[in-house]
């Protein structure tokens, strides 16, 4: 085998391996910090839609939705300073929830902003 021309290439595979492992580690850490918050927000959106549909079909006032969401907020990681605005329009109930959660990374803090509005479905409204 002719290895005389390859003396400068020694060790490059090790460096590439270390860089790939470092990138995978950073991505795993970001996922570890971000995904639980995003998943809880997804579940809270589903709860918002459920509560709005129940209030609309049962004839509850819009303030009932706010009370239900405030009761469930700690379970879904929603901060106490979240803004919850229920409105009743055209025999439908809308609710908007806004909050921000800081996600701290080494050297950087990311603000996860949650701003979602749900409306009750039209076929569930009481006429």
Image (tube, rainbow, N blue to C red):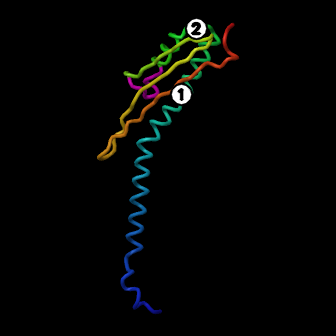
> Which quadrant would the C terminus be assigned to in this image?
top right
Distance between the Cα atoms at labels 1 and 2? 20 Å
Q: Residue furthest front?
A: 90
Identity of the residue drawn at 39% across and 64% down: 19
Q: Residue 113 or 103: which is nearer the viewer? A: 113
Query: Does label 1 or label 2 sit earlier along the sequence?
Result: 1
Q: Does the segment drawn in magenta span residue 69? A: no
- Expressed as whole percent of the image width and height from the top left, the position of residue 96 reads 50, 21
Residue 50 lies in what quarter of the image?
Answer: top right
Badge number at residue 13: none
Q: Is residue 113 above or below residue 63?
A: below
Q: Residue 62 or 17: which is nearer the viewer? A: 62
Q: Are marks 1 and 2 in contact (CB under 8 Å)?
A: no
Identity of the residue drawn at 43% across and 63% down: 20
- Expressed as whole percent of the image width and height from the top left, the position of residue 15 reads 37, 70
Identity of the residue drawn at 36% across and 83% down: 8
Left or right, residue 95 beside residue 24: right
Left or right, residue 26 beside residue 43: left
- Expressed as whole percent of the image width and height from the top left, the position of residue 40 reads 48, 32
What residue is pinned by disc 1? Answer: 45
Task: Name the secondary structure under disc 2.
Answer: loop
Q: Is residue 94 above or below residue 112?
A: above
- Expressed as whole percent of the image width and height from the top left, the position of residue 31 reads 45, 46
Left or right, residue 45 beside residue 79: right
Principal secondary structure, stretch drawn in magenta:
helix
What residue is pinned by disc 2? Answer: 60
Task: Name the secondary structure under disc 1.
Answer: helix
Q: Does the segment drawn in magenta span residue 73? A: yes
Q: Magenta residues, as a range?
A: 72-79
């Amino acid at each position: 085998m002719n290895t005389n021309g390859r003396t400068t290439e020694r060790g490059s595979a090790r460096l590439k391996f270390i860089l790939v492992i470092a990138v995978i580690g950073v991505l795993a850490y970001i996922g570890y910090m971000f995904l639980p918050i995003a998943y809880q927000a997804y579940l809270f959106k589903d709860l918002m839609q459920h509560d709005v549909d129940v209030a609309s079909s049962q004839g509850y006032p819009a303030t009932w939705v706010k009370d239900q969401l405030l009761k469930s907020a700690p379970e879904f990681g929603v901060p106490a300073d979240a803004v919850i605005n229920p409105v009743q329009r055209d025999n439908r109930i809308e609710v908007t929830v806004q909050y921000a959660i800081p996600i701290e990374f080494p050297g950087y803090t990311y603000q996860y902003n949650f701003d979602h509005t749900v409306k009750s479905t039209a076929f569930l409204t009481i006429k």
